Image (spheres, rainbow, N blue to C red):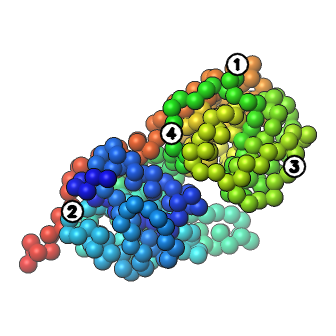
Amino acid sequence: MDDTGPLLIQVLPQLKPARCGVSDQAVLLARELNRGFGIRTAFVVLNSDVRSDVPYPVIHCAPTQLLESILKLSGGQACSILVHVSGYGYSSNGAPMLLAEALEKMKVDGRLRIAGYFHELFAGGPPWKSAFWYSHRQKAAVRKIAKTCELVVTNTGVHAKWLKRETLGGPAHSVELLPVFSAAGEWPVPAFPPQRAPVMAVFGLPATRKRSYEELSAFPGVLQDLGVEEFLDIGAGSEVPMELHGIAVRQRGAVDVVQLAKELSLVRYGFLPYDPLYLPKSSIFATYCAQGTVPVIAKPFDGEVDGLRDGVQVLSPATARQAIRAGLDRCSHEARKWYVGHSVHAHAETYARWLNQSVPVLEHQDARR
């Protein structure tokens, strides 16, 4: 690792690689920042004492100690911070006001520049759900955080639209849209679907996989249209069915990222139980696209969602039969093509460009004396 380049300190609620999607994104980004741009990384972890073995400096602290911890890591050098914003990671009610107040304190101090990647904004739901009552506080916290940021980045057009409307009274001049990148890395171009086994992968956390099988149980026709002969279940835990609609489910269990990429490169399809509006924020979807594995969802959609079209980069029950007739190569190619615009390198390049715009002045307080 380059020990002389500029420093970017990433702030996140926990650092648990392979057990937390935000952690995986942060560590992969750190690696690419150094490999591609000579930018060093350190981490500040708030409200979590869980330790992990990562090759970067790490400080665990409370939000009230954020400024002091960052200055300790910077060692008096000019640096900037990237805050990974995911409300429930920082606060049990999803409204990280202590983080927002800590960032406002840093902004007033004036010695550090702040960027924010908004993985989540706020929850929603009917009045009989707790999310409905927490939503107002969550929105207030997100507004406060975004208005401290010189660079605001998020993963879906829905999020970007809200941030533009609500928060651009701060130092940021625009909101950048960067869907998440693959948690399993980005490997050389894999084989196209016709050369792969007629298998559908289902992977993710236990709750995600459970939802996948529930949704697939309602759509036997799409499995027949796609010619699926087996399910490949990847992930730890969860009660997995032995078969679904007469199609066997093979349990692979938990695998590392290298094995995950290999497994996905050998199968034609990957299913995920998400609404089309939120596909760009799914690392599962990103991983399918990066491997050229054709993504399949249960809910058809019209028009375009952040560059995605049903029947082009992703398939649903409404488009599966037509896609088979047209050939799956096109869908695989278009999914990978869509993904390239927000690969891990594209993310790292965004922050490198921001860092190069200007340098924070850590000596400003001495200069004012």
SS under mark 1:
helix
* Mark toward the start of the polypeptide (4 vs 1): 4
Q: CA distance from mark 4 to mark 1?
A: 27 Å
**Label 3 packing within 10 angstroms: few (<14), some (14-19), many (20+):** few
* Residue 242, numbered label: 3
Mark 4 and mark 2: span between their CA atoms? 32 Å
Q: Is residue 120 left or right of residue 251?
A: left
Q: Secondary structure at mark 4?
A: loop
Mark 3 vs mark 4, CA separation in Å: 31 Å
* Residue indicated by mark 2: 78
Q: Label 3 near label 1: C-beta < 8 Å?
A: no
Q: Would you name the residue on which mark 1 appears?
A: 326
| Mark 1 or 2: the one toward you | 2
SS at mark 3 in the image: loop
Write down the residue under mark 4: 186
| Label 2, residues with CA under 10 Å away: few <14, some 14-19, many ≥20 | some
**Quadrant in the rendering for residue 268:** top right
For badge 4, the amino acid type reads Glu
Mark closer to the chain start, 1 or 3? 3
Task: Residue at the far right: name it.
Answer: 246
Q: Is residue 266 visible?
A: yes
**3 and 4 marks in contact (CB < 8 Å):** no
Dot 1 or dot 2: first in sequence order is 2
Q: Tag 2: residue type?
A: Ala
User: Which residue is drawn at the image coordinates 57% and 58% (left, top)?
Assistant: 18
As drawn, 325 above or below 142: above
Q: Depth-wise, is mark 1 or mark 3 nearer the camera?
A: 3
Give the mark, 3 or 4, whose residue is nearer the N terminus. 4
Q: Which amino acid type is marked by label 1?
A: Ala
Assess whether mark 2 and mark 4 are in contact (beta carbons under 8 angstroms): no
Assign a secondary structure to mark 2: loop
Mark 3 residue type: Met
